[in-house]
């Protein structure tokens, strides 16, 4: 490579694996598809549970703000807000991503709206965080347990990594 370290496609940031997998505009569409495949797999597993009602990407307006979590799950005693993110895997990155998702949806007006729609249930925030290179946040097990799929953790790791390879190949061949 020439001494210019800027991305050969977007020229915005230095070209690195993290840039290619997380922020380059050239790979944006594939990153969205990677995310959507994780959500689709979770939705399928959760929907198999008869005691759960799963809403995919509900559009919720609370206090003049639009919220669109990936999944809202209504259980007999709880309402779960599940939002997925695939992030880098530098130290602390996965937990920071989870904390940001919780902060984004822990909004009193949104929680009140969900309770008005689904009854006075306790709200639980369950971010589902993977890294592009297969790291799995241990708190994701709460979502898999809800889906009775805790033993299927590896499937999500492999799914994320397969899409990572697709993204990298697409970048290199573009």
Image (tube, rainbow, N blue to C red):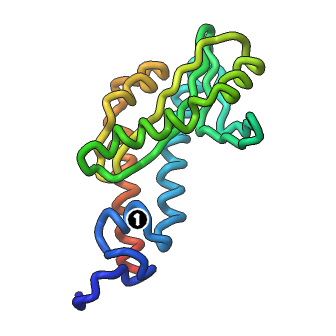
Is 26 drawn above or below residue 140 in the view shown? below
Image spot of residue 97 (x, y percent): 41, 43
Residue lying at 41% horizontally and 22% vertically, measured from the top left: 142
Image spot of residue 36 (x, y percent): 54, 48
Q: Is residue 33 left or right of residue 69?
A: left
Residue lying at 36% horizontally and 27% vertically, measured from the top left: 139
User: Could you say which is closer to the camera, residue 92 or residue 128?
Assistant: 92
Q: Is residue 40 left or right of residue 166?
A: right
Query: Which residue is denoted by mark 1 in the rendering?
Result: 167
Task: Kindly state the secondary structure of the residue where label 1 is placed.
Answer: helix
Q: Tell me where residue 136 sits by quadrant.
A: top left
Is 111 drawn above or below residue 30 in the view shown? above
User: Could you say which is closer to the camera, residue 41 or residue 70?
Assistant: 70
Q: Tell me where residue 104 sits by quadrant.
A: top right
Residue lying at 39% horizontally and 79% vertically, measured from the top left: 173
Is 34 drawn above or below residue 52 in the view shown? below
Q: Quadrant of the C terminus?
A: bottom left
Disc 1 crowd rating (10 Å Cα; few below 14, some 14-19, many 20+) is many
């Amino acid at each position: 490579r020439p001494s210019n370290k800027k991305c050969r496609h977007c020229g915005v940031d230095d070209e690195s694996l993290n840039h290619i997998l997380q922020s380059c505009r050239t790979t944006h569409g594939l990153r969205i598809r990677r995310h959507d495949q994780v959500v689709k797999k979770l939705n399928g597993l959760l929907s198999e549970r008869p005691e759960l009602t799963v809403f995919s990407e509900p559009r919720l307006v609370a206090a003049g703000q639009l919220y669109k979590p990936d999944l809202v799950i209504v259980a007999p005693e709880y309402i779960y807000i599940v939002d997925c993110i695939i992030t880098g895997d530098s130290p602390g990155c996965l937990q920071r991503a989870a904390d940001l998702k919780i902060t984004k949806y822990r909004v009193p007006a949104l929680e009140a709206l969900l309770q008005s729609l689904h009854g006075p249930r306790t709200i639980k925030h369950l971010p589902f965080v993977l890294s592009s290179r297969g790291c799995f946040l241990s708190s994701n097990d709460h979502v898999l347990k809800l889906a009775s799929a805790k033993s299927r953790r590896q499937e999500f790791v492999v799914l994320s990594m397969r899409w990572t390879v697709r993204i990298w190949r697409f970048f290199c061949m573009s």
